Amino acid sequence: MPQLPPNGLRVVHCPVNIGGIPATNVAALKRKGVDARLLMFHPPRLRSDEPDIVLNTPDGLWRRQLVQARALAKLLPETDVFHFYFGLTIVPRSLQFPILKATRKKSVYHFLGSDIRRKTPEELEYRKRADAQIVGSYDAIRWVPEAAVVPPGIDLSRYPVASVNGNRRGDGRPLVVHAPSDRRKKGTDSVIEACERVGAELDIVERVRHDEAVQRFARADVIVDQLNAGWYGLFAIESMALGKPVLGFLNEDAVARTERAFGVRVPVVNVTKETLAERLAEVIEAGPDERRRIGEESRAYVERVHDPDRVADQLLEIYAQL
């Protein structure tokens, strides 16, 4: 293993905070003694994360570019590594990477899923301009084969294990929670149909503040994640941390590679649109004790795979190799 960077390392994560992943990474790196900062183009709307730098980029191409160029000029002498998310950079790519090369700064592209999924190699050719690439799962590596796999971390202290008892409403029906960022992409119509078939109540969580969303996840008997992408998302990670059984569609090869890499079974109940109703009925009929068992296994899995301090160690190893 290469020597890890000293605590004097200066890293900027930018320019968005999708799912709170960049903010979580920055906080974990700071705990390791790294001078890590989060830069965002705009202040957060639905999350409580506090960025270190907010550019408040204005409307209008030239005004926006001027603000971003000034920010980059200020950051260059203060930064060793620029850690970019979602395929975005501070200034346009055509300028960003020549500037970093000329000033001998290192860079990382950190992809989060929808920014690469189902795109062609030609569409993703730009990724090679960075010194390293990161993806969040062994499913996503299909699109960026040379990338390091670093699962997203979450602050587990914010997700106490919730009870699986007493979550039913007055009519006694089990409560299923589903939180699509995009109904078509997440297969929401199939979730609605499955819940109607098994007689479950469905709470669809959309466009609310993150803290309210987590409160609603915690009331669930069962969580249904996405049915199309092939891997679970942050919603599922947060729900597993709360001790909830999660159903979703997983790529079998990615499951096997994940289990080999981390030495733990992936506890998500693997379903398709066609099998969702049947598997959902099985989990409901298994009763609260079995759901509690799945939930405990799920929490343990998140503690092993999605612990932010372990994620920070992985990032430090990547930085050391740049």
Image (cartoon, grey):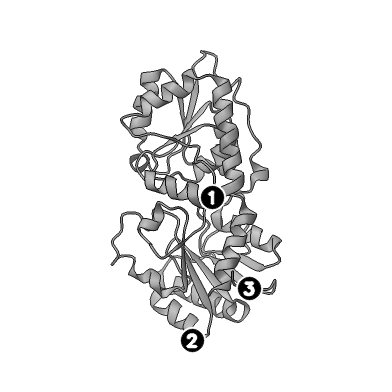
Q: Is residue 134 above or below residue 284?
A: below
Q: Quadrant of the N terminus?
A: bottom right
Q: Is residue 66 above or below residue 118?
A: below
According to the picture, the residue beneath numbered tag 1 turns out to be 262
Instruction: Answer whether residue 251 is visible to the viewer in this image.
Output: no
Q: Secondary structure at mark 1?
A: helix
> Which label sits in the foreground, 1 or 2?
1
Residue type at mark 1: give it: Phe
According to the picture, the residue beneath numbered tag 2 turns out to be 102
N-term-proximal mark, 1 vs 2: 2
Q: CA distance from mark 1 to mark 2?
A: 39 Å
Q: Residues within 10 Å of mark 3 (few under 14, many from 20)?
A: few
Q: Residue furthest top?
A: 171
Residue type at mark 2: give it: Ala
Residue type at mark 3: give it: Gln
Q: Tell me where residue 218 appears, x and y as whole percent.
A: 58, 32
Q: Secondary structure at mark 3?
A: loop
Q: Tell me where residue 292 appears, x and y as whole percent.
A: 58, 27
N-term-proximal mark, 3 vs 2: 3
**Residue pictured at 34% horizontal, 29% vertical:** 275
Mark drawn on residue 3: 3
Mark drawn on residue 293: none
